[in-house]
Image: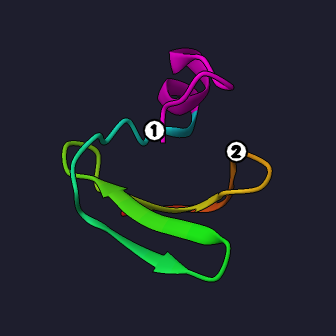
């Protein structure tokens, strides 16, 4: 999800920096987690931002 349209700072701010293959596609979203932080989020593939983030 880190791509040329977003810097690393956005992902650090949100709390999801996963580059692993643990994700699911759901409509126009990539639902993924960050194993270190216990965070789940839905990344919008159109806007290149997270629509929602849940922290455990």
Check disc 2: other Cα within 10 Å, few if <14, some if 14-19, many if 20+.
Answer: some
Q: Is residue 13 left or right of residue 31?
A: right
Distance of label 2 from label 1 (alpha carbons): 15 Å
- State the scheme by which the image is colored: rainbow
Quadrant for residue 22, please give it.
bottom left
Give the image location of residue 39, x and y in percent: 38, 56
In the image, residue 37 lies in the stretch drawn in magenta: no
Disc 2 or 1, which lies upstream in sequence? 1
Give the image location of residue 12, x and y in percent: 48, 26
- Circles 2 and 1, Cβ within 8 Å, touching? The answer is no
Q: Secondary structure at mark 1?
A: loop
Residue matched to label 1 = 15
Residue 33 tag number: none
Q: Quadrant of the C terminus?
A: bottom left
Name the residue at 47% across, 76% down. Answer: 25
Q: Residue furthest right?
A: 47
Give the image location of residue 45, x and y in percent: 67, 57
Name the residue at 33% across, 58% down. Answer: 33
Give the image location of residue 34, x and y in percent: 30, 49
Q: Residue furthest front?
A: 4
Q: Is residue 37 above or below residue 31?
A: above
Q: Is residue 24 above or below residue 22?
A: below
Check disc 1: other Cα within 10 Å, few if <14, some if 14-19, many if 20+.
Answer: many
Name the residue at 51% across, 61% down. Answer: 41
Residue matched to label 2 = 48
Mark 2 or 1: in front is 2
Nearer-the-camera pick, 20 or 54? 20
Name the residue at 29% across, 55% down. Answer: 38
Nearer-the-camera pick, 13 or 22? 22
Quadrant for residue 9, please give it.
top right
Magenta-drawn segment: 1-13
In the image, residue 7 lies in the stretch drawn in magenta: yes
């Amino acid at each position: 999800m880190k791509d040329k349209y977003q810097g690393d700072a956005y992902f650090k701010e949100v709390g999801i920096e996963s580059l692993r293959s643990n994700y699911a596609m759901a409509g126009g979203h990539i639902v993924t987690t960050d194993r270190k932080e216990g965070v789940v989020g839905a990344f919008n593939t159109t806007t290149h931002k997270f629509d929602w983030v849940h922290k455990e």
